[in-house]
């Protein structure tokens, strides 16, 4: 059976970029990212490594969104932050209306750093608040308290204007009432975007080991689901409607960079552990910051893994990630861009999800139902 249609496009040049800055004050017990704590002595070598990797572009590239994450980019002292942003700006150019996001730790937010960010065109800041509750913050091993978090949001809103915060729910011993208090505080602050995530226990993390030893107990499924729906209701009531499984904002303040990923568009990735998707190839740099530095300074590629993505894989991934948006995924656009007719290739899987009441097919758009929103992982897995 022919399951392809004519594709009208080749691989388009990336129009987004991610830069990973690995430095942190300390590693939280649940963190599985590429980070180093207590190694600020590596900052100079990291910047030289990043400069080398960026120079492999050959020439400056025009992009639409830029996201600098980590780690904690704002852990860098202001003068180092200035150097890093200057370097990145030499190779990655944003238009006047481009989205420039930087992740930040509440404890690092001060007027000097915010002035540096603003001077370099940063127009969106993402704060890793995670909670305002002192006991929960201690469980999560965060290094700030409610007052610091509140002040950070207020200062960032005054300086940058567009402030997103991350919150974690389903922490050990957390109750729905406690989570509601976090949500109420967050929605009472001058934020434009909210992201909420259930605590996960990734293999290799301290929390994974502690749960294995029964030192930590994860929330049961019913409690986690109740907390999730509380987030949806509270955010919507505060003028932050849900637009993706974990994301809440009014349409003008949706994260354009993340939407870029969910739509399956190409992006550049720089820094340790960073992934990129360029010319149909997915490349992931070595996770170890020291290995990344060593390879780059020796003039060797820091890429650890590289795979060619077929158009069918691309189509499946676009469907699986795109369906997690509340607007749904445009199957006709996927067919037009990839030459793969998802409605045909995944006909049985889509029918199963419809029969279970998880999705609706409205013309060419596949959309999660209310029931499907709570089972988005199941739907995504069926489409992959």
Image (tube, rainbow, N blue to C red):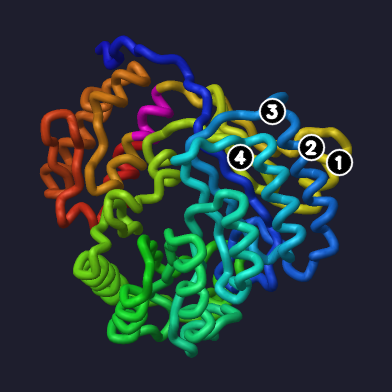
In the image shown, does 258 or 88 lie closer to the viewer?
Answer: 88
Do the CB atoms of the residues marked 4 and 2 lie less than 8 Å apart? Answer: no
How many residues crowd around disc 3 within 10 Å: few (fewer than 14), some, or many (20 or more)? few
Q: Nearer the viewer, mark 4 or mark 3?
A: 3
Q: Is residue 158 magenta?
A: no
Please indicate, yes or no, whether residue 369 appears anywhere in the rendered image.
Answer: yes
Q: Residue at x 57, y 44 (%)?
A: 18
Please indicate, yes or no, whether residue 215 appears anywhere in the rendered image.
Answer: no
In the image shown, does 340 or 107 lie closer to the viewer?
Answer: 107
Q: Residue at x 34, y 85 (%)?
A: 178
Do the CB atoms of the residues marked 3 and 2 lie less than 8 Å apart? Answer: no
**Where does label 4 land, which residue?**
269
Label 3, label 1: how far apart the Cα atoms are = 16 Å
Quadrant housing residue 60: top right
Q: Nearer the viewer, mark 4 or mark 2?
A: 2
First in sequence: mark 4 vs mark 2: 2
First in sequence: mark 1 vs mark 2: 2
Secondary structure of residue under mark 2: helix
Q: Nearer the viewer, mark 3 or mark 1?
A: 3
Q: Which residues are magenta?
A: 312-318
**Where does label 2 land, which residue?**
52
**Where does label 1 land, which residue?**
297
Where is residue 372 drawn, in percent x and y?
A: 20, 52
Predominant SS of the magenta segment: helix
Label 4, label 2: how far apart the Cα atoms are = 13 Å
Quarter of the image where the C terminus is located: top left
């Amino acid at each position: 059976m022919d399951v392809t249609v004519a594709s009208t496009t080749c691989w388009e040049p990336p129009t987004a970029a991610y830069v990973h800055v690995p430095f942190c004050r300390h590693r939280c017990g649940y963190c599985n990212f590429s980070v180093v704590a207590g190694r600020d002595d590596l900052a100079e070598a990291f910047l030289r490594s990043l400069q080398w990797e960026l120079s492999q572009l050959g020439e400056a590239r025009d992009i639409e969104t830029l996201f600098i994450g980590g780690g904690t980019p704002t852990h860098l002292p202001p003068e180092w932050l200035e150097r890093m942003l200057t370097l990145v700006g030499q190779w990655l150019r944003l238009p006047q209306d481009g989205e420039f996001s930087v992740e930040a730790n509440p404890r690092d937010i001060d007027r000097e750093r915010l002035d540096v960010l603003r001077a370099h065109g940063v127009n969106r800041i993402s704060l890793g608040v995670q909670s305002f509750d002192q006991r929960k913050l201690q469980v999560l091993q965060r290094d700030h308290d409610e007052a610091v978090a509140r002040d950070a949001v207020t200062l960032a809103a005054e300086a940058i204007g567009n402030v997103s915060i991350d919150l974690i729910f389903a922490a050990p011993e957390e109750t729905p009432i406690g989570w509601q208090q976090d949500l109420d505080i967050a929605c009472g602050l001058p934020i434009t975007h909210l992201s909420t995530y259930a605590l996960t226990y990734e293999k290799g993390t301290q929390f994974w080991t502690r749960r294995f030893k029964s030192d930590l107990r994860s929330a049961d499924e019913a409690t986690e689901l109740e907390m999730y729906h509380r987030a949806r209701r509270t955010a919507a009531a505060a003028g932050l409607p849900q637009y993706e499984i974990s994301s809440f904002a009014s349409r003008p303040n949706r994260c354009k960079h993340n939407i870029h990923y969910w739509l399956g568009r190409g992006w550049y990735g720089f820094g340790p552990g960073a992934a990129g998707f360029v010319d149909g190839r997915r490349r992931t740099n070595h996770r170890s910051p020291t290995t990344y530095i060593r390879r780059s300074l020796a003039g060797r590629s820091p890429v650890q893994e590289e795979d060619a993505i077929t158009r069918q894989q691309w189509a499946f991934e676009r469907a699986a990630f795109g369906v997690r948006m509340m607007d749904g995924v445009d199957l006709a656009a996927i067919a037009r861009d990839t030459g793969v007719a998802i409605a045909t290739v995944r006909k049985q899987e889509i029918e199963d999800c419809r029969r279970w009441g998880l999705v609706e097919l409205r013309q060419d758009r596949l959309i999660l139902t209310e029931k499907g929103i709570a089972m988005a992982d199941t739907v995504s897995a069926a489409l992959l």
